[in-house]
Amino acid sequence: MTTQDPVSAQAALEQEIAQLIIDTLNLEHLTVADVAVDQPLFGEGLGLDSVDALELALALQKHYAIRIEADVKASRKHFATVASLAALVQEQRSACGS
Amino acid sequence: MIALRIEQWRAWAPGVATEEAWLAWAQSPRVLADQQEQPECLSLPPMQRRRLSRLARMTMEVASPLCGDDEQLPFVFASRHGETTRTLDLLGDVAGEQPLSPTQFGLSVHNAIAGQWSLLRGQRGESVAIAGEADTFEHAMLEASTLLAAGAPSVLAVIAEEVPPDAYDGWITDVPFSYAVALRLGCADVAMPGSTWQLDLDRHDGDTPPCPWPHALDFLRAMQTAAPSLQHAWKRRRWQWQRS
């Protein structure tokens, strides 16, 4: 096992998630650099909608083998930004790993 | 008997999009090579464009120029086979016991493209999505004529087909290449520019071979080559087109 600086590991995960969002939702006019980690994904930010939320939840579950609960309030928090999604993936991974 | 006036038309197929290109095709019809090209639809914002399938892009491309920004036109979307690419992907996921994509699922229904047209162009009026057999084109004209008879001054009808994925080889044989035809139709008895046609349906008992071209494209060919009439036979139906 390689040891990785936790800060760069987090940045790498955020980049990966930004790319996943672009690929999954056909945002062909954007690159990872256009999606700031703390930019709101829905509404006034990136402009995603409720169908995107479902699509993104599915992609994250497939890609990271994690489970996302159908809790609207919690989802709203987790799906706010790339950074919050990365935190969710991180948390679910360590929960599954333990 | 139905009487229609073709006020305006647009058509798209791989490599054939202008009036001149369609005239050349009409004069010597041929099978066009289909390399999955699609209209770019660059006039639409990227966030709206991203959910348009190839079939939807073809539809937007031909319909858009025929509807003014301040106009509301009843819309007829006609396709025999519809979104075969999307539906085959979904069927593959079902067979593989994979969860279905909500976007793909939502947009796989036959009236999804009519819905996207309504959203993208702010069209709040009536829209119809139909699928018939090889004479889907004539059924679309019938549908449009009922909307005209109900009082619409003009109706926008789009007939669109995409070459289906390979899995359909031998099953779908009437789409030689992807195409979309948009016709802006008006009542025949109004003195306005455009070519006027009568359409009659008779019983077909003979063994007239099916038309070698999709009916909508064959009609386009007749319109451009000033043919006085044409016939499309399918099963027990014989559609007679006559210029008036």
Image (cartoon, coloured by chain):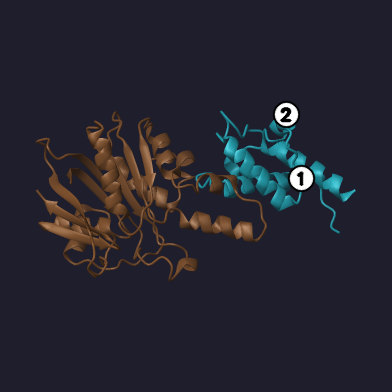
Chain colours: A cyan, B brown
Q: Is residue B101 visible?
A: yes
Label 2 and label 1: CA atoms lie apart by 16 Å
Q: Which mark is residue A73?
A: 2
Q: Quadrant of residue B76?
A: top left
Estimate the x, y position of residue B28 in percent, counting from the top left.
Answer: 19, 67
**First in residue order: circle 2 vs circle 1:** 1
**On the picture, is B20 further left or further right than B147?**
left
Chain of the residue on which disc 1 is drawn: A
Query: What is the crowding at mark 2: few (fewer than 14 residues within 10 Å), some, or many (at least 20)?
Result: few
Identified by mark 1, the residue type is Arg
Q: Nearer the viewer, residue B33 or B123?
A: B123
Element class at badge 2: helix
Q: Residue at x 40, y 41 (%)?
A: B114
Query: What is the crowding at mark 1: few (fewer than 14 residues within 10 Å), some, or many (at least 20)?
Result: some
Q: Quadrant of residue B179?
A: bottom left
Estimate the x, y position of residue B54 in percent, counting from the top left.
Answer: 42, 53
**On the picture, is B207 further left or further right than B101?**
left
Chain of the residue on which disc 2 is drawn: A
**On the picture, is B80 further left or further right than B231?**
right
Q: Is residue B66 visible?
A: no
Q: Do badges 2 and 1 share one subunit?
A: yes
Q: Residue at x 57, y 58 (%)?
A: B91
Element class at badge 1: loop
Q: Residue at x 39, y 48 (%)?
A: B57
Estimate the x, y position of residue B13 in percent, counting from the top left.
Answer: 31, 58
Most extreme residue toward the right is A98
Q: Total of numbered circles in the picture?
A: 2
Estimate the x, y position of residue A71 in percent, counting from the top left.
Answer: 74, 33
Q: Nearer the viewer, residue B69 or B166?
A: B166
Q: Which mark is residue A7?
A: none
| Residue that label 1 marks | A67
